[in-house]
Amino acid sequence: MPLALEVKNVVKTFQSDSGEIRAVDDVSFAVEAGEFVALVGPSGSGKTTMLSILAALLTPTDGQVLIDGTDLARMSETERVVLRRQKIGFTFQSNNLIPYLTARENVELMIRLNNKFDRAAKVRSAELLSRLGLGERLNNLPAQMSGGQQQRVAIARALIHAPTVVLADEPTASLDTERAFQVVQTFAALIHENNRAGIMVTHDLRMCQYVDRVLQMRDGKLVKVYDTREEILALAKGE
Amino acid sequence: MNNISLAAYLSWQEVWRNRGRFFLVSLVIALITLLVLFIAALGEGLGNANRQYLSRLDADLLVYLEKTDFVIPSSRVERSTIRAVRRVEGVADAGGIAASNTAILLNGEEEVLKVSLLGIEPGRPGDPPVVEGRRISGDQAREVVIDRNVILRSDIKVGDLITIRSTQGTRDEFYTLRVVGLTEGQQYTFQPSIFVPYETWDRVRTKSDAERERASSTVNVIAVRLAEGSQAVDVSANMTTRIDNIEIADIQTAIENVPGYTAQQSTVQTQAVFTLLIGVLVIGGFFQIQILQKVPQIGVLKAIGASNAMVGLAAVMQIIITTTLGVALGSLLAFLFSLGFPPTVPIVFDGLSSAVAIVALLLIGPLGGMVSIFYAVRIEPLKALRLS
Ligand SMILES: Nc1ncnc2c1ncn2[C@@H]1O[C@H](COP(=O)(O)OP(=O)(O)O)[C@@H](O)[C@H]1O
Ligand SMILES: [Mg+2]
């Protein structure tokens, strides 16, 4: 079994007026199936850029990204589109949902994209939403839900199609603390239960208590990895 | 395949969940449709009022007096020329047509109905087919065949006697004629027509004192029917070499040279084209603004694995749904309105011109929305992340 996700010496540079920006600078790490990893670091440290590369939305300037052992760089654009809908689950910081689809339809959309929509898929979508505490909200449109509820619908959408990798960009940004803990806890549980490789970008170190490993970035570089339980809990408590 | 059904699903959900907004756009398209269809019908109606008689002539060519630029009222052709024309090789038959105006007295002289008074030669080209009653019996008969448009504007029936008024020099004279037949769709110069034999026409038409003294020997034009297998060009050439002082036009040219006809038709067409253009801009504007608002959600769609083809197709389908609904609604409205129009209004819904208008209207949506579709396809999925 290949690793779910492997990142090898990835570099991403942008050209700007003030010269070249190395948004991601020689980063390497790997995530196994069933592992939940947090990506932390100050604003501008390259977290979103890293996530975009993992999601096959951005091609690295150098280095390799392998999902289930396949190198993204060797894929055509069409293959990358297919990869995004089959092997990747994604939640964005905001504006996650399609505004004219209900909670349930937003989740089902992911299955429709994979052309696997049927009665069973409908049931699974409803169950997953219930699990996330949205059993009463199945037929609500995004505009009728709070930011936290929308974020949970997005999490359901990122998981429903059994992807290899689940990526979440600041899933708690629009939530109050109480809600944030709850959402990340459920998210972590689902990642573990379903054996997905989960990566969550967050600026809120307290959320790290639910993850298995923390990758800390600064100026595009991976500067520190916390992988023991003690280290992670200490980081989460702000020690 | 999945692309098509998914695009259909998404575009329909969006239209349905925002039905108020999309319906408003459809309503605008419906009004534009109504307007375009009415302009087309007006063009048809006005055109008919001018050309109907000529376009239905049982003839292929019209012979005019030379240098009259195919203007029928200016043309005077000697009756002897008609016989000469008939002798030309390739001519099956020819008949003189003389046109003037008169008024039919209605309700015991209280009202008049102004009509075109056409003098024709019974049985010759120019004599219209009758749908009820019979044709005029002879050159001298005091008989008249009337256009159905006369009946629509009065209560005259076949078999009735009608009185027409004409000014002879300085006096009004009245003539009584028997209606023997009914013909259909024969308007000429914006008026319903009545047909009398040439001799009768010459007697009853309005004329000056000088003209009263002698019988006229001219018609306005000669309608020529070609013999089977002969070419209009050859016969025209034959005629112009053998007969002096004439010019010849085919029916289409004759119609286009009816005073005002071409100017009127092009005015109407320009209106229709501008209305369509407004439609394109309105729809284009709406969908362009809407696509700008949709950048984040389209970014999300692409980021989670929707293909460009699917996103583009969904945009196209949405435009087609909106436009089709609008055009259908507008056509229905036009149809309902048309039922309520009095026959005297020159609005005629003709199958062909309505169909052309409807096709053009269905195209304004995709045409107007084209820019927005290209825009949708070009949105980068990365936008979904960066906008957050
Ligand atoms: N498309 C781009 N063009 C130029 N510079 C960019 C682009 N995207 C990101 N950057 C730069 O790369 C660096 C990392 O950005 P980002 O990945 O958004 O960091 P983070 O998500 O950790 O805040 C920043 O300096 C940012 O300005
Ligand atoms: Mg970021």
Image (spheres, rainbow, N blue to C red):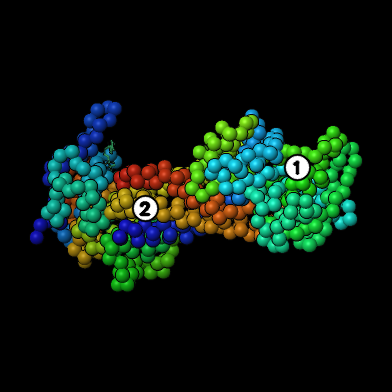
Q: Which residue is labeled 2 in the image?
A: B313
Discs 2 and 1 share one subunit = yes
Q: Quadrant of residue A197?
A: bottom left
Q: Residue at x 43, y 63 (%)?
A: A140
Q: Nearer the viewer, residue A33 or A180?
A: A33
Q: Nearer the viewer, residue B354 or A238?
A: B354
Q: Amino acid at mark 2?
A: Leu
Where is residue A59? Give x, y as percent: 21, 43
In the rendered image, is residue B36 in sight?
no
Where is residue A16? Give x, y as percent: 27, 30
Q: Where's the N terminus of chain B, which quadrant?
A: bottom left
Task: Please determine whether, in this image, residue A38 is positioned above or below residue A219.
Answer: below
Q: Which residue is labeled 1 in the image?
A: B100
10 Å crowding of disc 1: few (<14), some (14-19), many (20+): some
Q: Nearer the viewer, residue B293 or A145?
A: B293
Q: Going from the N terminus, do you reach mark 2 or mark 1 first?
A: 1
Task: Please determine whether, in this image, residue A233 is positioned above or below residue B65.
Answer: below
Question: Are the residues flagged by discs 2 and 1 in contact, CB closer than 8 Å?
Answer: no
Q: Quadrant of residue A210?
A: bottom left
Q: Quadrant of residue B4?
A: bottom left
Where is residue B122? Give x, y as percent: 69, 52
Task: Give the farthest residue toward the left.
Answer: A1
